[in-house]
């Protein structure tokens, strides 16, 4: 009996994403400085700064393949679609186990020291995952800085990677306490700062990203408020113009009504005057001096005369 694969839609999206990244890889030229520091074999932890979306793509184009520590791609797509089941294990513990397996096989394991991508190009506080892996495996750490040279794709055109020598961490091993692990993180951070020339910020990149996001939201809300205020002012002016026009129309109608009444009154008086004149002409004597026929006496005419 045919059993549908519930992961098929997620895998289809993943395949299309991989194809898109492959096309992008062919279009981007990557320059690598210090490639002689990359060991030919053996397990190595590669510590990256994270300044652009194409960081992973950049280093996979140089030398050996770097395997970045991430959750399952299918699980990532399923989380986006809201189909991910709740996990009870420690995510970092799972990543440490995965890193130990890869390093034991002689792979190069890539880690973004800051965790999330820098929101403004500065280097932010390192996360403890790298130090925990070093404490667990004792693997060497190779610092690789992605240098932002300004441009289009991921803020860069012709991206450049600066590879430094492995960081000397032997004096901190075994890293059995929090202080030793923090020293490992600080040493790798210093190496990345020297390679990248970035400005260091002693806060988490996620916190800074949240702050910038809040600032952007506040700015957008302020702009929206200004737009709403301008629209309200324009609406008030429009309504005032309409009210003024209506008042002018009403005043014009009143004046026209008064003019019509005055014209009617003038016409009535003119008609009365014309009637009086006709009566007066009818009562005048004939031109030969005869008395003529006066006709019946008109009391109204008599009163007016």
Image (cartoon, rainbow, N blue to C red):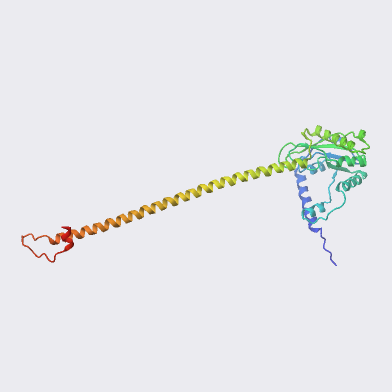
Specify the quadrant of the image occupied by residue 191.
top right
Judge by depth and name the residue closer to the eye, 156 or 84. Answer: 84
- Residue 297 lies, in percent from the top left, at 14, 64
The quarter of the rendered structure image containing the N terminus is bottom right
- Reply above or below: 36 against 98: above
Is residue 38 visible in the rendered image? The answer is no
Q: Residue furthest left?
A: 289
Q: Residue furthest bottom?
A: 1
- Residue 93 lies, in percent from the top left, at 88, 47
Specify the quadrant of the image occupied by residue 4.
bottom right
Query: Does residue 245 appear left or right of residue 36 in this picture?
Result: left
Judge by depth and name the residue closer to the eye, 95 or 212. Answer: 212
Is residue 252 visible in the rendered image? The answer is yes
- Residue 174 lies, in percent from the top left, at 94, 37
Specify the quadrant of the image occupied by residue 272.
bottom left
Query: Does residue 233 appear left or right of residue 29 in this picture?
Result: left
Residue drawn at x 91%, y 45% is 100
Judge by depth and name the residue closer to the eye, 285 or 194. Answer: 285
Query: Does residue 225 appear left or right of residue 266 in this picture?
Result: right
Count the labels in the image: 0
Query: Does residue 46 appear left or right of residue 222 in this picture?
Result: right
Residue drawn at x 67%, y 43% is 218
The quarter of the rendered structure image containing the C terminus is bottom left
- Reply above or below: 15 against 283: above
- Residue 166 lies, in percent from the top left, at 88, 35
């Amino acid at each position: 009996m045919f059993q549908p694969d519930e992961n098929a839609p997620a895998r289809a999206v993943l395949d299309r994403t991989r194809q898109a990244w492959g096309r992008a890889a062919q279009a981007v030229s990557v320059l690598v400085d210090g490639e002689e520091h990359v060991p030919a074999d053996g397990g190595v932890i590669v510590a990256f700064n994270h300044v652009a979306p194409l960081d992973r793509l950049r280093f996979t184009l140089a030398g050996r393949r770097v395997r970045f520590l991430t959750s399952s791609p299918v699980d990532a797509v399923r989380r986006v679609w809201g189909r991910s089941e709740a996990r009870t294990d420690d995510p970092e513990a799972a990543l440490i186990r995965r890193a130990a397996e890869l390093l034991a096989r002689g792979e190069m394991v890539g880690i973004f020291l800051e965790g999330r991508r820098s929101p403004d190009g500065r280097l932010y506080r390192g996360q403890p995952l790298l130090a925990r892996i070093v404490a667990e495996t004792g693997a060497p750490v190779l610092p690789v800085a992605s240098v932002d040279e300004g441009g289009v794709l991921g803020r860069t055109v012709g991206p450049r990677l600066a590879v430094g020598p492995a960081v000397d961490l032997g004096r901190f091993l075994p890293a059995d306490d929090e202080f030793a692990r923090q020293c490992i993180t600080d040493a790798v951070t210093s190496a990345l700062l020297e390679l990248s020339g970035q400005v260091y910020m002693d806060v988490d990149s996620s916190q800074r990203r949240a702050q910038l996001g809040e600032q952007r939201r506040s700015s957008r809300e302020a702009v929206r408020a200004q737009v709403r205020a301008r629209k309200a002012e324009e609406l008030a002016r429009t309504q005032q113009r309409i009210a003024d026009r209506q008042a002018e129309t009403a005043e014009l109608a009143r004046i026209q009504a008064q003019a019509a009444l005055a014209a009617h009154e003038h016409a009535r008086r003119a008609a009365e005057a014309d009637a009086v004149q006709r009566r007066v002409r009818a009562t005048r004597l004939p031109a030969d001096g005869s008395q003529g026929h006066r006709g019946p006496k008109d009391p109204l005419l008599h009163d007016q005369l």
